[in-house]
Structures are given as C-alpha cells and as structure tokens.
C-alpha cells in the first residue's frame, strides 16, 4: 500500500477465490421476528428491492460528483483508495476501489445509512440507540476489480462483543461474473477464526468450501450480514461495474479493546 496526495494505492498479491457451488435467491421473511430468527441462524439476510430507481440515480450522481472532485475533498475515515496505477486509463484518471466517510461527503448517502428498513431490522439486536462504525463504497470496476479472499470483518475491528451488523446496498446488479458476494451460511457461529497472511484471510476447509454460496443482488437490494460470517468475492470479469455501499453498525455497549485511540463513536439513530 502506498499513499499519494489524499489517496491510497492498494497493491495486492494474486489470490484465487474458488467459485461457489450454491446460490441464494431468497427474500427476507415478512415479520421482524422471523427476520431476526433467520439472521441468527444464517448470519445474513437480504431485503429485495428496497431502494427506488430514482434514489439509486441520485446516489450514482453523488458518487460521480465525489469522484470528479476528490482532490479538493478532505479524506474522511478510510479516505480514498485506488487500484494499482497500471490499471488506470490515464495518469489523471484514477480507478477507485474505495471511498470512505461517504455519509459525510453526501447528504444522500447520509439518508441511506439511516434508512428505516435498516434501522427497523437493527433495533431488536441493538436496542433503541444505533451507532455507525463504518461507511464506505466498495467498487469492483469492470475488468479491474480484484478478488477479496475469505475473511471475517470482526478480526479487523477491535471491539467486544464481535456483533457488528453491516448493511450492504447494491448500487449495481451484482452477479457471479462481476463479483457477487460469497458467504458460508451459519459460519458466524464459529466465533473468530485464525487469519493469516498480508490479506488476513482464512483458508476454507473442503467441508466449508462445499457450503459456499453466492448471494446475487439486484441494484437496490440490501444485504444484512454479521461481522463474523465468512465471506469473499471473485474478481470482476465483466464489462459492468459492481459498486456496493457498506454501512457497519454497533451499539453503545460495545467496548474498544485495541491499543491507541478508538474511532470516534457516532450515534445516528434513537427510537422513540
């Protein structure tokens, strides 16, 4: 990883993510109680068709505005991360991999992270106060976006309990060919596993590989997933982008266990 001006250039070793043998096409159950039960068992849940085409168009315009003007913007939280410059179309046209602090950069994304469907789902797990831990847009650009090996998000985040819940909103259709997420259903119940290497990844056993499942999404779908569920994605081998907005949430009782200063906590919702 190198830093240039107000952006980060990520360079990774080649990693091969094996294609999954299963595909999940279900929708979330109709009641909050059934949704919570499904999530507790499987570690993920998908709300289909949450965001309207009009709202997706607004978010797309905001992403373009931020990308066009990022050199004049102050990096927030995880900042701006780019693919290797060898994959840029020209030296002055960087290829984005990540935009952090997206809720601060855009009022539209700030509304998205507080979306009622997401908040309604979180309250039974966290109680009346919801805090935001992370807000990023992750991108797999056509023919450029790289794979992400198997991992659990919680190993990167030094808090107890390891009970973060993330909302991944598809800004584009996410299919097998452009890097749809893979999960191992129920793997959040294993607890934190040993990760290794530069990527801090997990090597799947044959048994777990046989359970790997694609979760394809249409633009506007929202995937809720537990911070301990094993997940990965293959590279974007298509001519279509795969952009995902990921918000990770926590509750006031979460305790920081790392060295140094914790990320400032941000209350974003309180139910009446």
Image: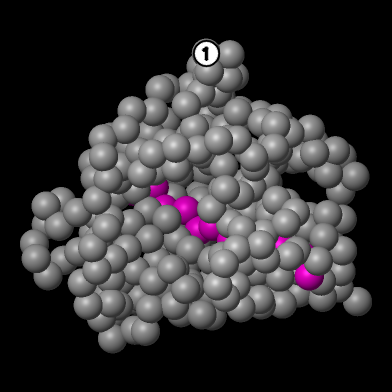
Is 61 placed left or right of 253 in the picture? left
**Magenta residues?**
240-252
Q: Residues within 10 Å of mark 1 (few under 14, many from 20)?
A: few
Residue nearest the viewer, comparing 10 with 20: 10
Q: Give the residue drawn at x 23%, y 63%.
A: 2
Is 118 placed left or right of 5 in the picture? right
Residue 212 on the magenta span? no
* Image position of 182 with respect to 155: above or below: above
What residue occupies the far left of the structure in this picture?
90
Observer able to see residue 50: no
* Image position of 64 with respect to 9: above or below: below
* Image position of 217 with respect to 214: above or below: below
Percent from the top left, x then y, of residue 139?
Answer: 37, 53
Observer able to see residue 176: yes
Q: Give the residue drawn at x 34%, y 84%.
A: 73
Image quarter hosting the N terminus? bottom left
Q: Give the residue drawn at x 20%, y 64%.
A: 94
The prevailing secondary structure element of the residues shown in magenta is: strand
Residue 243 on the magenta span? yes
Color style of the picture: one colour
Q: Which residue is mark 1?
A: 206
Residue nearest the viewer, comparing 122 with 79: 79
* Image position of 55 with respect to 223: above or below: below
Residue nearest the viewer, comparing 154 with 217: 154
Percent from the top left, x then y, of residue 224?
Answer: 66, 48
């Amino acid at each position: 990883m190198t830093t240039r001006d107000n952006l980060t250039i990520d360079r990774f070793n080649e990693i091969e993510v094996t294609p999954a043998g299963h595909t999940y096409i279900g929708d979330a159950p109709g009641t909050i109680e059934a949704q919570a039960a499904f999530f507790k068992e499987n570690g993920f849940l998908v709300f289909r068709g949450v965001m309207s085409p009009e709202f997706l168009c607004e978010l797309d315009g905001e992403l373009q505005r931020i990308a066009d003007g990022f050199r004049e913007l102050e990096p927030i939280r995880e900042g701006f991360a780019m693919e290797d410059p060898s994959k840029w179309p020209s030296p002055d046209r960087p290829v984005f991999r990540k935009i952090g602090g997206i809720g601060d950069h855009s009022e539209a994304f700030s509304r998205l992270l507080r979306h009622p469907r997401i908040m309604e789902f979180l309250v039974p797990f966290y109680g009346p106060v919801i805090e935001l831990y992370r807000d990023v847009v992750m991108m797999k650009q056509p023919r450029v976006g790289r794979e992400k090996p198997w991992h659990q998000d919680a190993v990167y985040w030094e808090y107890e309990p390891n009970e973060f819940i993330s909302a991944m909103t598809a800004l584009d259709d996410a299919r097998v060919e452009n890097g749809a997420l893979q999960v191992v259903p129920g793997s959040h119940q294993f607890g934190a596993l040993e990760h290794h290497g530069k990527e801090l990844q997990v090597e799947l056993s044959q048994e777990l590989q046989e359970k790997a499942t694609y979760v394809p999404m249409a633009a506007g779908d929202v995937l809720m997933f537990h911070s301990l569920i094993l997940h990965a994605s293959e590279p974007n081998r298509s001519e279509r982008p795969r952009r995902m907005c990921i918000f990770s949430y926590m509750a006031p009782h979460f305790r920081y266990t790392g060295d140094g200063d914790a990320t400032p906590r941000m209350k974003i919702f309180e139910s009446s």
